[in-house]
Image (cartoon, rainbow, N blue to C red):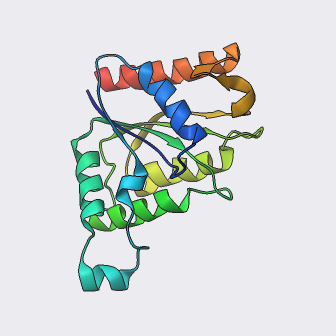
Amino acid sequence: MKILAFAGSNSKKSINKELLNYALKQLNNAEIDLVDINDYEMPIYSIDRQIENGFPKEAEDFYKKVENADGIVVSLAEHNGNFSVALKNILDWVSRIDMSFLKEKKILLLSTSPGSYGGGNVMEVATKYFSMFAGGEIIASSTFPFFNDNFQNGEITNEELKATILEKIEIFQDALSK
């Protein structure tokens, strides 16, 4: 199994990167391509830029990584109820290469935040975007509230949240094995 994994945050101290790394450690028999979206920084998408200059190399490279993956694991940062601008820009460019760029891709969506909703707003946006617009198959998803209270030293300390996350990871991994 080839898995593309990334956090939807360009922060160096992203809690979503921490949750993502935890999730990836739980996967077995997988070749994981962990990418940092900071490596795919591009001009803000506009049709004028696309017509004048074509697609940035970073957009084409990200598209190829998606294309080569069997599954995708994403931990989404929430910025004002939506994707981070850094991730949104990547998605805008890549979707212009192929609107259904996630077709036939199995996806595990995670999100976390310091607050009680755990990135629930971005999860709602992402569920619609990744499945309806980009054509992916969301196998499992989970929000993780109160990150700073429930995650310490690379481990989930809240047993109920841990069980939920592990269950979602197992569902995802089982779907990839079929």
Horizontal relation, residue 31 to residue 72: left or right: left
Please say whether residue 132 is visible from this viewpoint.
Answer: yes
Q: Position of residue 73 (x, y in %)?
A: 42, 36
Q: On the image, which quarter does residue 43 sit in?
A: bottom left
Identify the residue at image location x=65%, y=22%.
Answer: 152
Split into 4 quadrants, where in the image is the C terminus?
top left
Split into 4 quadrants, where in the image is the N terminus?
top left
Identify the residue at image location x=27%, y=69%.
Answer: 56
Q: Position of residue 126 (x, y in %)?
A: 53, 50
Please say whether residue 178 is visible from this viewpoint.
Answer: no
Q: Position of residue 66 (x, y in %)?
A: 29, 47
Identify the residue at image location x=32%, y=26%.
Answer: 176
Kindly give the residue lying farthest to the right in the view shown. 116
Q: On the image, which quarter does residue 47 sit in?
A: bottom left
Horizontal relation, residue 10 to residue 161: left or right: left
Q: Position of residue 110 (x, y in %)?
A: 54, 36
Horizontal relation, residue 149 to residue 55: left or right: right
Q: Is 171 located above or below residue 36 in the figure? A: above
Q: On the image, which quarter does residue 30 sit in?
A: top left
Q: Is 169 located above or below residue 77 in the figure? A: above
Q: How many marks?
A: 0
Q: Is 152 located above or below residue 51 in the figure? A: above
Identify the residue at image location x=51%, y=38%.
Answer: 17
